[in-house]
Image (tube, grey):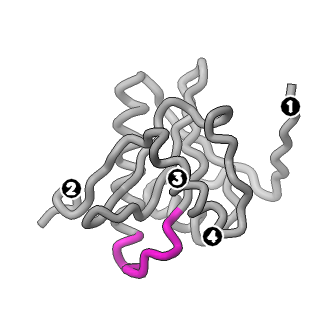
Amino acid sequence: MTTEEIFKIKKVTPDDYAMLNSWYAAWGFSEIAVDQVLPEYGAIVEYQGVGIIAAFLFLTDSVIAHPEWIVTNKEFKHRKLYKLAFIELFKNLEEVAKAKNYHAFILSVKNSFLIKSLEGIGFRKTDTNMTNLIKEI
């Protein structure tokens, strides 16, 4: 059985926002103002109808796209499936980005496990010890 047969990948819809915010809260993150900050495309990987991991794809006016707001369902206990679901999620994000003529991803990541996972699927470190800043305009 292939990973494509094990997992279902669905586009995030507004019906998913409450669930995703509960995932962020479970990890100690603030809720996202979903109606204001999320991009058009986000994906959720499901296993047997249960969401495992999700991310959003922020597109720019250059050839760089930003997969961000990566979050997992803390209640999902099949840890071995996380790695496979993670790989499928990023395959999906790459397909979407490539179809729109994007050529590279760039991410800001603090979590060491996530960094290692991203390096495992072909990402490489560029800058370290960075601080991300935001200003409402």
- Relative to 53, residue 56 above or below: above
Q: Find numbered disc 3 in the image and state the secondary structure of the residue it sits on.
A: loop
Q: Nearer the viewer, residue 103 or 100?
A: 100
Q: Measured from the top left, where is residue 1 in percent x and y?
A: 12, 66
At 41% across and 23% down in the image, what residue appears?
100
Q: Is residue 55 left or right of residue 128?
A: left
What residue type is disc 4 on?
Ala
For label 3, count other residues whose C-alpha is less than 10 Å away and answer few (under 14), some (14-19) or many (20+).
some
Which label lies toward us, 4 or 3? 4
Q: Measured from the top left, where is residue 90 in percent x and y?
A: 41, 50
Q: In this view, does 5 lie to the left or right of 116?
A: left
Q: Is residue 16 left or right of residue 11?
A: right
Q: Are marks 4 and 1 in contact (CB under 8 Å)?
A: no
Q: Label 4, on which residue?
A: 26
Task: Give the residue furthest to the top.
Answer: 61
What residue type is disc 2 on?
Glu
What residue type is disc 1 on?
Glu
The residue segment tinted magenta is 72-82
Which picture quadrant has residue 116?
bottom right
Q: Label 1, on which residue?
A: 136
Which label lies toward us, 2 or 1? 1
Q: Find numbered disc 4 in the image and state the secondary structure of the residue it sits on.
A: helix
Q: Label 3, on which residue?
A: 123
Alpha-carbon distance for marks 2 and 1?
Answer: 40 Å
Upstream in sequence: badge 4 or badge 2 = 2
- Relative to 57, residue 31 above or below: below
